[in-house]
Image (cartoon, helix red, strand yellow):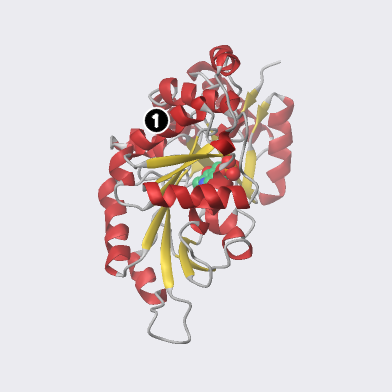
């Protein structure tokens, strides 16, 4: 049966070549810093992001919390977009694990709004305040439809944070998508921030893993925090090899995911289906139907025909393109969704 999983770009399966690279990986105990494959992966990530060092972690969520903990935010305020992954989708770790107060900033444009940051900024001269110490930026912005921001746009936020003596963390789960969509270098984005978390298991197609990148002494600290929260790994080169393969082979091809998403968005528009407008779109399409009572009916009708995706709110859906979906399958999947929307009589 036709089978297309459009729920996320996390669903990709490792290719035979990737598995071969894993099979051949040289390994050692990475807690003793003896794993040569992990070292190669970490130095590649440091080079790509233009940072001095990098640390391999199991997931994006672990990468973000390790990065935040390593900025010593306990007892401080941290600004994050109100629709950001860090504020909404990481179990509240920012407060429960890192002990910081999360100030949620308006991020309708995909980036924290400077005038709103100005309003909620807490300075350290007032005894009532938990001072604002760190700003988190997400690029691409998942809930804004996978919107990519340019380096110049990000710099406006970063400059404001610097003027206010704040540190900056970039949740770059999909920074490679942003780089491709905007024609910018990943390292130019990362030059604006103190730390960045990049995901290998999204568009890059590795089964596991993320990296935290930053200055050398900062990454030393992150190594300590990773161990403290139980993230020290042993012969992990076996999966780090998949990450190396992903960085070597799967970056440029993400442009195809973006063109598939753009093509499908046009198909939806031509069929009269409402889609979320995104200034610089990447590999996602958010779309809507009119009748909220039919939310689940559409999902199950499409799933029965082999097309899986998720709803983000009543009557609203997200589909995500990734390396297991070629252009032909993207079009077939979109046709099935369009037919089912028509059939359920929305
Ligand atoms: C997926 C994602 C993460 C976290 O990644 P996991 O590996 O699922 O923990 C962080 N930030 C953003 C924007 C994401 O989309």
Residue 328: x, y in percent?
A: 51, 16
In what element is the residue under mark 1?
A: helix
Does any portion of residue 112 appear in the rendered image? yes
Please tell me in which quadrant of the rendered image residue 282 appears: top left
Front residue of 63/229: it is 229
**Mark 1 CB within 8 Å of ligand 1:** no
Between 319 and 200, the residue placed more toward the observer is 200
Q: Quadrant of ligand 1?
A: top right
Where is residue 231? Give x, y as percent.
62, 44
Furthest residue in direction bottom, as rendered: 127
Residue 332, position as x, y percentages in the image: 57, 20
In the image: residue 311, left or right of residue 266: right
Q: In front here: 129 or 285?
A: 129
Q: How packed is label 1: few (under 14 Cα within 10 Å), some, or many (20 or more)?
A: some
Residue drawn 53% across the image and 55% down it: 86
Left or right: 215 as drawn, with respect to 26: left
User: In the rendered view of the protein, which quadrant contains the C terminus?
Assistant: top right
Residue nearest the observer in this picture, 72 or 169: 72
* Whether residue 163 is situated above or below residue 158 in the rendered picture: below
Q: How many marks?
A: 1
Q: Position of residue 188 (x, y in %)?
A: 28, 42
- What residue lies at 37% left-to-right and 61% top-to-bottom? 167
Q: Is residue 322 visible?
A: no
Query: Which image quadrant for residue 18?
Result: top right
Name the side, left or right, on which 236 lies relative to 142.
Answer: right
Report the residue marked by disc 1. 44
Q: Quadrant of the N terminus?
A: top right
> Residue drawn 48% across and 63% down?
72
């Amino acid at each position: 049966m036709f089978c297309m999983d459009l729920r996320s770009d996390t669903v990709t399966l490792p290719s035979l070549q990737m598995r071969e690279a894993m099979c051949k990986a040289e390994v050692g105990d990475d807690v003793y810093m003896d794993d040569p494959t992990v070292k190669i992966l970490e130095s590649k990530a440091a080079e790509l992001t233009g940072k001095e060092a990098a640390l391999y972690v199991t997931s994006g969520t672990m990468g973000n919390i390790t990065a935040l903990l390593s900025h010593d935010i306990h007892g401080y305020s941290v600004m994050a977009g109100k629709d950001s992954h860090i504020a909404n989708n990481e179990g509240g770790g920012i407060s429960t694990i890192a002990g910081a107060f999360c100030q949620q900033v308006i991020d309708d444009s995909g980036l924290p709004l400077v005038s709103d940051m100005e309003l909620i900024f807490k300075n350290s001269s007032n005894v009532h305040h938990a001072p604002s110490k760190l700003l988190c930026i997400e690029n691409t912005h998942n809930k804004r439809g996978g919107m990519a921001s340019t380096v110049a746009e990000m710099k406006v936020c970063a400059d404001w944070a610097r003027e206010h003596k704040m540190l900056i963390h970039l949740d770059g789960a999909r920074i490679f998508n942003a780089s491709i969509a905007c024609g910018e270098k990943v390292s130019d984005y990362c030059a604006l921030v103190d730390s960045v978390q990049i995901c290998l298991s999204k568009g890059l197609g590795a089964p596991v893993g993320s990296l935290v990148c930053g200055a050398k002494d900062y990454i030393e600290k992150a190594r300590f925090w990773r161990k403290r929260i139980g993230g020290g790994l042993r012969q992990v080169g076996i999966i780090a090899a998949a990450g190396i393969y992903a960085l070597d082979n799967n970056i440029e091809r993400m442009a195809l995911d973006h063109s598939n998403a753009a093509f499908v968005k046009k198909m939806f528009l031509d069929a009269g289906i409402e889609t979320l407008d995104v200034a610089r779109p990447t590999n996602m399409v958010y779309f809507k139907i009119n009748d909220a009572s039919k939310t689940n009916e559409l999902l199950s009708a499409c799933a029965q025909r082999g097309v899986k995706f998720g709803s983000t709110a009543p009557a609203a859906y997200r589909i995500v393109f990734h390396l297991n979906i070629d252009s032909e399958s993207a079009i077939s999947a979109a046709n099935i969704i369009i037919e089912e929307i028509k059939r359920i009589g929305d």
